[in-house]
Image: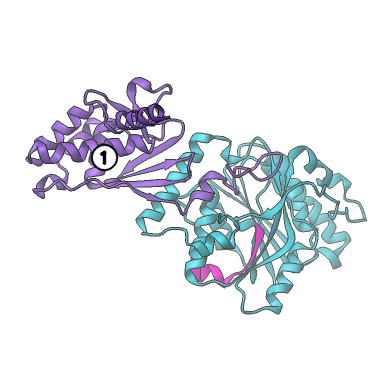
Amino acid sequence: MSITVIIPTYNYGRFIESALLSVLLQDFRPLEVIVVNDGSTDDTDLVCEKVRKWLTDHQHTKPDVYQDVTLMLVHRENDGPSAARNTGLNLATGDYIAFLDADDLYPAGRLSDMVDFLEENPSYDMVFGLAQIIPDAFMSQIEIHCEDLNAKHPDIHHPINNTFQTKRMPGVHTGVYRKKAFSKVGKFDESLRYYEDIDWLLRAEHTGMEMFFTEQVVLYHRNHAGSMTSNIHEMRKGHLNFIRKLRNSNQTLPDSFNIKWNFSP
Amino acid sequence: MVLSAVLICFSNFIQSVPIKNQSFVTNHPRIALESINGETIIIDFETGLYYSARNEAYIIIELMLSGLSLQEIMDTCVQYSKLDAELVFPLVEGYIAALLEAEIIVPAAEATQVTDLTETSATKEQDASLLNHAIWTTGTFNAPVLESFKDMQELLLMDPIHDTTPKGWPEKK
């Protein structure tokens, strides 16, 4: 069994090094990482190439640890997170799929714990964990830089201040999925730039996918001013687009979905 | 005590009967609204409710967004439906009153904010399509309906995906 981690990114060159390393340093193998550069105009490519060099070097010096790790960099014209994730899905070879946004981090052991769960529980199609919201300033406590990576692995278990909220986050980046789930549910709706996660999860619910929720923190979610929804106008358009899609398909969010994702009254 | 009760009733009466020469705009920034393919979707970011307006309701909203006064909207509906004013006027008036009551729209004279870019007001082309709308051929003018939905309430009031803050998840309003 193998896993593919898909990282869509748009102009997050300042964050992606840490995000990538938090994946490459996971203890699950074989590991395939696909970075989909969604038309970035910043230094994303340079940073990714730097990490790729780091990986190549370590594949020579520590083949026992890194020989089953591949890092693929893919470019596409900017078309939003759904299209970028779908590009990654089209290339993915893993039996399991996970997603990471380029400004977030995986805690250590996250992939192996979640894949182990799905291996031991074949009735579930996907497993989700909790996200912890970390202010940007505090995220630097757990950021990992290539220069710091010597013979010893950095401790990505770095304790996070427990006062930061830890909750269920209804996004696809808190899950691990059997690849076949995407054959049943379909891919991400490329017409949506907001709530594309909710849309996919809602379709998974309607398709009868079995979801399990752990109480383990599986994502450090960075809160920073540059997040997509800092533009109120775009956010509102996103809300309207998603609601229009619901209306066009005569759907509403079912109570079971709201309860499952903890946003029911 | 009695006086205050009467005043409340009177103020409600005033609010529920829109003035006929008034025109209206959406209640920004609280409301976002979009019309596509014969349906208007309205989101109230203060209550988390969203609304759908189709057919007669859609026509009225589009005419309202084009800047017509209530009287002009009523006259247009009478002209194109070819039905009696006694039938059409109260239905249009009642619907505008319902939009006011839900605070989706406000009298244009009271509006303090410029129109949000999410709002689609009728262009000349849209005006033409409104006036050729299929409802005018039915020979009827049904009571316009303001359908409301609350299934997105939690998401809209407290967007747990996007609307996080340095303190963590957004607070429930």
Q: Residue A200 placed where, x, y %?
A: 51, 60
Q: Where, quadrant-wise, is the C terminus of chain A in this rendering?
A: bottom right
Crowdedness of circle 1 by 10 Å Cα count: few (<14), some, many (20+)?
many
Q: Is residue A98 visible?
A: yes
Give the residue at x 92% y 56%: A152
Question: Within the image, what quadrant is residue A168 found in?
Answer: bottom right
Residue A194 visible somewhere in the drawing: no
User: Left or right: where does residue A78 sit relative to residue A70?
Assistant: left
The colour mode here is by chain
Residue depicted at x 14% and y 39%: B88
Q: Residue at x 57, y 41 (%)?
A: B173
Hue used for the chain lettered B: purple
Chain rendered cyan: A
Q: Image point 42% across, 21% down: which residue?
A: B112
What is the x, y in percent for residue A142? 82, 47
Q: Which residues are magenta?
A: A174-188
Q: Relative to residue A6, is residue B122 drawn left or right?
A: left
Q: Amino acid at mark 1?
A: Tyr
Relative depth, front residue between B158 and B20: B20
Q: Position of residue A106 (x, y in %)?
A: 74, 55
